[in-house]
Every structure is written in structure tokens, then in C-alpha cells.
Amino acid sequence: MSRNLSKFLPLALAALPLSAQAATPAIDTGDTAWMLTSTALVLMMTIPGLALFYAGMVRKKNVLATLIQSFAICCIASIVWMVAGYSLALGTGTPWIGDMSRFMLSGIADHFHNGADQAFTLGAGSANPTAMTIPESVYMMFQMTFAIITPALIAGSFAERMKFSALCVFTILWSLLVYAPVAHWVWSPIGWVGGLGAVDFAGGTVVHINSGIAGLITALVIGKRRGYGHEDLSPFNLTYAIIGASLLWVGWFGFNAGSAGGANGRAGMAMLTTQIAAAVGGMAWMAAEWIHNKKPTALGIISGAVAGLVAITPAAGFVLPGPALIIGLIAGIVCFWASAILKPRLGYDDSLDAFGVHGTGGIIGALLTGVFAYGPLSATDANPQGVVGSATQFLRQAEAVCVTIVWCVIITFLILKLIDLTIGLRVSRDEELEGLDMVLHGERIN
């Protein structure tokens, strides 16, 4: 609905009979309270959660630069989402991209006219609108936190070697050209991937496959760190990483349970399955590492927990606790293999395993959603009441995974090449040896 039309909406509603007015979505205070809480939890996942998680895994000379990357991305992505990202991702538009009806958040406060305090309809004017029970400002802000953490996750792939100016430009372009379209395809009521029947509860494709694949492409384009494979690149402070991972785990309840859109039974199930998958993911990675390397490490168990959280994300509101355990178990083992065995064999430098954990875990979770989606929860026509999983749903999930990967690979590569040809992607050899803290920001940890 255009801004001009929305100005006349309250007058039009007043002229309708009471029965018609009752159909207008009403705000549920309990749902709104939970979504406000979830929004704060998801924001906490990036700052300080992801910032500390990543900073604890780099060398001392790059700790501040790594922390600043997450903080700067939070600022940049918030502005991009406010100006155009939200409208492009979740405006009605076409099945391929949203419109600009919410450019600069135009019209987002129209429901306050004449003292009204009403919820909104996502995809209003489309053939498949979704009535919400929360204010649009809350929904927009909740979705903003997803738009923040996704490019921040990519930073783990190029840690310790990308220019800060390149990071800023990359965040803007990638948010508009990769994140917004994929979010629209998957989560808009008229998005074409959602229209295929694929489901993604909280961001397996939109957040994790997107960021993981982008991370892999970035690591390949920007090249390895100096000394990779023959110098000591050990983490500076794993205490930071453990604190960061713990904040990610807690914040993930907002990420997954908040994606239910309110305080309801689906949110409760999503919270339960999230906890189970994270716990078993940590144990699975630890066991695999214990067998392979003869010792369980702190970095291993926290990485496994994050892998379990990633894999359960697309499935959290669609599966039962038993399948959640299986998803976490598979994710912990396979993500360990991708990060500790496959990466060294192939020789690429995904510094903090953005692809090994988020890309791999996201693919696992998206596919296994098709295997374990429980009919009464998933509400897909491929999963009727009482049926768990189906070949049809698995194929739909695989199709969603493939189109996300193809789009992300092509556009991310083009963005990186454009930046490299203009302002350059990478710091010089001497700058990298000195450390990004002093070279880029003029500060250091004492």
C-alpha cells in the first residue's frame, strides 16, 4: 500500500461496519513483549557475542580490528536496512524483489493515526498476506537484527587481512544485492522460493548458507593470511571466544524462538529444539575431535555448539525434539570434518570457519528440515497432519539451497572484484605483519 493510500486507511476503516473493522489485525501485548525481548537477544548475538567470539580466535595484534568489524557492521547494516533494505526484502513488490514503499521507513507509523494502535499485515495487497499481531516497527527491528548479523558472520572468513574501507563498502553492497533479495525470496508472502514450498524457519538459507558461501568466496578471492600453514596463528584469548559463544547460545533463543512471531507454542518448541541441538552439537564435535586429535579442546566444544545452533535454525519451529538431537549430532560431526579435515586438504584459508560452520551447518539444517518436518508443525502441503518428512519436501529444500548458493556465489564474487579494482580489498604485506589494530585504527591492546 502506498503512503498516500495509507493516510486514508483510518478514515476508510471508520466508515466500515463493526464486523469489517474486527478483521483489522490487533496488537497482542504478550506477542509484542516477546518480540521486543527477542530483538534485543538477537542484537546481543552480534554485539558483543559474535564480536567476542571472533576476536578471541585471532592474534593479539588484530583483536581490536576484529571487534570493530562487528561493531561497524552493526551500524552500517542498521542504516542500510532502514533506508532501503527492509523495503527491498519485505516490501510486497514482485516474487523476485520487494518494492520501495518503505523507503526510509515511509508510512511505518501510519497505524498511529487518530490514536489507533494496530498491528500490520505483511504482504498487504498481495494474494497471500500474513496478518501479524505486533507493530510493524517491532517486526522491522527484529528483521534488522538478522540483516546485521549475516554480513558480520562473513567477517570470520577474511579475518586479519581485509581493509576496513573495503569492509564498509562490501557490507553496503552485499546487504542490498545479496541479503535483501534472498530474504524476499524466502520470507516474503509472495517470494518465489517460498512459493516453491521450501521452508526456512529462522534463516538457514537467508542467514547461514548466505553468509557461509559468501565467506568461502571471500576467502578464495582475498587469499590466505601471511604465514598460513607454516607459522603459529594460534588464537590470542579463547576466554573471549568462550564468552562470545555463550552469548551467541543465549541470544539464539531470540533468533529461533522469536521467529515464531509471538509468544506461542511454536516459540516454545523452537526454544526447546534449539537447546537440544546446541548441546548435542557441542558434544559431537568434542567427541570427533577427541578421537581425531586425542584431546578435546575448548575451541572445539564451542564450535560444535554453534554448529548445532546453525543447523537447527531452519528447522527449529518445524521439528520435534528427537529430530533436533539428530540434526545437532550430524552438524557437530560434519562441521568438524569440514573445518578440521576438508579445509586443510583443500588449502583455503577460511580464518574462523564461516563456511565450515555456517555454510556447512546451514546446508545440513535446510536439507534435514525436509527429512524431519513434522506435519502439524510445518503446515506444508508436502507434510500433511501426522506425517514426518517427505521426499517432496526434501527436494524443495534442496532447490532452495541450490538457488541461494548460486546467487550468493555470483553476486558476492562480482562485489569483491569491483571493490578490489577500485579501493582494493587487502592490506599490504607489511601492514598485515604489523597488525590491523595499529595500521587501520591506531590503537592496540596493552
Image (cartoon, rainbow, N blue to C red):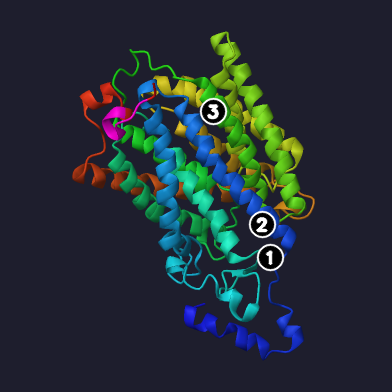
Residue at 49% x, 37% y: name it. Answer: 359
Query: SS class of the residue under badge 1?
Result: loop
Residue 379: image location, x then y, percent: 71, 57
Residue 177: image location, x then y, percent: 37, 54
Q: Is residue 244 above or below residue 234?
A: below
The residue that disc 2 covers is 261
**First along the sequence among labels 1 and 2:** 1
* Alpha carbon separation for disc pair 2 and 3: 29 Å
Left or right relative to 380: residue 407:
left
Q: Are marks 1 and 2 in contact (CB under 8 Å)?
A: yes
Between marks 2 and 3 in the image, the one whose residue lies nearer the viewer: 2
The residue that disc 1 covers is 133
Residue at the top extreme? 294
Q: Nearer the viewer, residue 149 or 446?
A: 446
In the rendered structure, which amino acid carries the disc numbered 3?
Cys
Span highlighted in magenta in the image: 438-444
Whether residue 402 is visible here, answered yes or no, is no
Q: Are marks 2 and 3 in contact (CB under 8 Å)?
A: no
Residue at 47% x, 48% y: name it. Answer: 148
Q: Is residue 426 above or below residue 414?
A: above
Whether residue 111 is visible here, answered yes or no, is yes
Query: SS class of the residue under badge 3?
Result: helix
In the rendered structure, which amino acid carries the disc numbered 2?
Gly
Q: Nearer the viewer, residue 102 or 392?
A: 102
Q: Is residue 52 found inside the magenta-colored segment of the image?
A: no
**First along the sequence among labels 3 and 1:** 1
